[in-house]
Image (cartoon, rainbow, N blue to C red):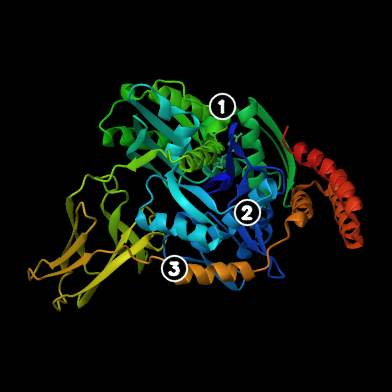
């Protein structure tokens, strides 16, 4: 039986198999191991995953969902056209397409897998990942913490002496720092820190903002999608060389610019500062200093930026390990763990349990101009706090004469509660008071057994109302998993063998948007030609024309950034 590991990522997902020669990545139908974690519903109700869905983030954003890993276990739905999906269902769609890729590659059914999860995922989020796996027809044997998987890929479990590893993971939209301790085949996550809203995409956004200011004709709204795409290409170019020349058509205006590495560094100075803090925090929480770190491992595509490598080396006074492609390390490590599970030698992957893995807080209302707006998150117990812990905060009624206050408790790191996980609610009566705002104390107490006590006290009367939150909210039942598995199985999925055609059409459309006016006619003719070849249904013609057009597009796409 094949031993399979999966990295279900925020921006990209990968699948790998453990072979006699070690872990190996499996390519998708487009010939690359990176499948964007994007799902889209086509006009005819067909579900598209990966690269083909990603090109639709620009052309059909209301039918397309990305970044849903952030809402695993949260009560949030994504609308794709007329259909609604949860984060688990969208993840299941991605997992199912990875499963199909692995089955096509191996020529056998793929069921048993190891899936990686962020070290800070709580029980509910971990269960959501397992549920997504089951919805995709997989059997998740185990989950592995992403930093542990990265360390496994580097073989760091075999280090002789006890050692301390810092895993620096800068992906597309998230930044995670973890400190691991390895000792006699056990890997323990000592602390985690990060920023759930900071990643490579923010670097692209800074560059796109800058490019917008260089547009020749700023009348009208610049085409944000095209601008971003160009900025992304420029960013990748700057990882290879010291400056890039750009020339493209953005929504009708000419863009001609040169960007140097130094300029890029200046543009992103604010982001670079933000990256320093979680590292300090993670060291502090693990009670360690920079000199205690034996090895630094880089994970995530954005760590390819030279400026990040320099930053890490300066801050940690050590050259980071970067021998293995930072986009691949987690999937490869998950496959290693799958191989070890197969030999009954699975590595013990422990997360320190005597700290809170997430922030706990309540919903608040803020005065926005003249309006009171609810939905804001007020953190009370910060993540990584040693348990047991008890923290109090005082809030006030929003208007005089208010007679009831609803305390909604959430866990999570997002600034708005809708992106966090709802834990429970408590309503308290407030004495009628037209003169003043009433002060209310909210005390949260969290203990080792995972019980959360909420005590709400009206300070003017001393009256307290309490609630104990035991079970994590919203766990998905086996019946629900089965129902979703069936409904996903019934959804039309774009046939794998047609993926390449679909992808080429997406590239043509994207190229058309960015092309200079003089080139547009040629691109349009290629579109028409390709459609007519597809209609004639001769497979060898389709392949030939696809390759011809692909080669022309390579030149066009390469032509915008030099
Ligand atoms: P991940 O979530 O690990 O797949 O990382 C994706 C992020 O890495 C995106 O923001 C990419 O733009 C970024 N990225 C990938 N390759 C490079 C590169 N060569 N240089 C700079 N950023 C990159």
Gap in angstroms between the C-alphas marked 2 and 3: 22 Å
Of residues 456 and 321, which is closer to you in this image?
A: 321
Pick whichever, 313 or 366, lies toward us: 313
- Residue under label 1, please give it: 262
In this rendering, would 90 be left or right of 257? left
| Rendered-image quarter of ligand 1 | top right
Callout 2: 10 Å neighbours few (<14), some, many (20+)?
A: some
Q: Earlier in the sequence, mark 2 or mark 1?
A: 2
x, y percentage for residue 512?
78, 51
Relative height, residue 54 to residue 83 (above, below): above
Q: Nearer the viewer, mark 2 or mark 1?
A: 2
Q: CA distance from mark 1 to mark 3?
A: 54 Å
User: Where in the figure is residue 41, as x and y percent of width and height?
Assistant: 65, 65
Return the residue at label 3.
Answer: 478
Left or right: 403 in relation to 555: left
Q: Is residue 268 above or below residue 129?
A: above
Per the image, label 1 sits on a secondary structure element best described as: helix
Please state if 225 lies on the left or on the right of 145 as rendered.
Answer: right
Q: Is mark 3 within 8 Å of ligand 1?
A: no
Look at the image and tell me in which quarter the C terminus lies. top right
First along the sequence among labels 1 and 3 = 1
Q: Residues within 10 Å of mark 1 (few under 14, many from 20)?
A: few
Q: Is disc 2 placed on a helix, strand or loop?
A: loop
At 37% across and 58% down in the image, what residue appears? Answer: 124
Are the residues tagged 2 and 3 within 8 Å (C-beta)? Answer: no
- Earlier in the chain: of badge 2 and badge 3, it is 2
Asked if the beta carbon under badge 2 is closer than 8 A to the nearest atom of ligand 1, the reply is: no
> What's the residue at 63%, 35% (across, down)?
236
Q: Which residue is mark 2?
A: 109
Q: Secondary structure at mark 3?
A: helix
């Amino acid at each position: 039986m094949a031993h399979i590991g999966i990295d279900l990522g925020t921006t990209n997902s990968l699948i790998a198999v453990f072979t006699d020669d070690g872990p190996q990545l499996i390519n998708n139908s487009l010939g690359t191991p990176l499948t964007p974690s994007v799902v889209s519903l086509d006009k005819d109700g067909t579900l598209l995953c990966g690269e083909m869905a990603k090109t639709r983030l620009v052309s059909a954003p209301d039918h397309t969902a990305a970044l849903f890993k952030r809402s695993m276990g949260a009560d949030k739905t994504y609308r794709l056209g007329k259909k609604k999906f949860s984060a688990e269902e969208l993840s299941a769609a991605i997992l199912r397409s990875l499963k199909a890729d692995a089955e096509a590659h191996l020529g056998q059914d793929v069921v048993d897998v190891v899936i990686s999860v962020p070290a800070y995922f709580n029980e509910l989020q971990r269960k959501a990942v397992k549920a997504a796996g089951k919805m995709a027809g997989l059997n998740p044997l185990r989950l592995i913490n992403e930093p542990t998987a990265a360390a496994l890929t580097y073989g760091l479990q075999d280090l002789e002496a006890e050692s301390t590893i810092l895993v620096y993971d800068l992906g597309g939209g998230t930044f995670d720092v973890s400190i691991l301790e390895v000792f006699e085949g056990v890997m323990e996550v000592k602390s985690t820190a990060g920023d759930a809203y900071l990643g490579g995409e923010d670097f692209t956004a800074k560059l796109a903002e800058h490019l917008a200011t260089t547009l020749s004709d700023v009348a009208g709204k610049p085409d944000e999608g095209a601008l971003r795409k160009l900025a992304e290409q420029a960013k990748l170019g700057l990882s290879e060389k010291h400056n890039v020349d750009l020339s493209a058509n953005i929504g009708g205006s000419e863009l001609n610019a040169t960007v140097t590495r130094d300029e890029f560094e200046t543009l992103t100075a604010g982001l670079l500062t933000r990256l320093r803090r979680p590292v300090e925090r993670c060291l502090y929480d693990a009670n360690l200093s920079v000199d205690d770190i034996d090895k630094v491992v880089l994970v995530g595509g954005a760590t390819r930026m030279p400026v990040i490598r320099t930053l890490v080396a300066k801050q940690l006074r050590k050259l980071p390990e970067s021998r293995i492609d930072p986009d691949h390390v987690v999937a490869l490590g998950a496959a290693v763990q799958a191989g070890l599970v197969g030999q009954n030698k699975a590595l013990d992957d422990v997360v320190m349990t005597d700290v809170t893995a997430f922030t706990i807080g309540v919903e608040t209302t803020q005065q926005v101009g003249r309006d009171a707006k609810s939905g804001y998150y007020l953190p009370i117990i910060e993540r990584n706090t040693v348990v047991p812990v008890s923290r109090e905060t005082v809030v006030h009624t929003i208007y005089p004469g208010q007679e009831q206050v609803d305390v909604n408790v959430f866990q999570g790191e997002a600034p708005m509660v809708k992106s966090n996980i709802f834990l429970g609610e408590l309503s308290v009566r407030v004495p009628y008071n037209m003169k003043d705002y009433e002060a209310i104390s909210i005390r949260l107490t969290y203990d080792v057994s995972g019980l959360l006590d909420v005590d709400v006290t009206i300070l003017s009367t001393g009256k307290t109302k309490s609630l104990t939150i035991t079970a994590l909210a919203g766990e998905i039942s086996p019946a629900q998993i089965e129902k979703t598995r069936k409904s996903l199985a019934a959804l039309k999925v774009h046939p794998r063998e047609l993926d390449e055609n679909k992808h080429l059409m997406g590239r043509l459309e994207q190229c058309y948007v960015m092309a200079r006016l003089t080139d547009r006619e040629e691109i349009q003719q290629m579109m028409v030609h390709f459609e007519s070849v597809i209609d004639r249904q001769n497979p060898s013609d389709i392949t030939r024309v696809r390759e011809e057009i692909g080669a022309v597009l390579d030149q066009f796409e390469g032509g915008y950034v030099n």
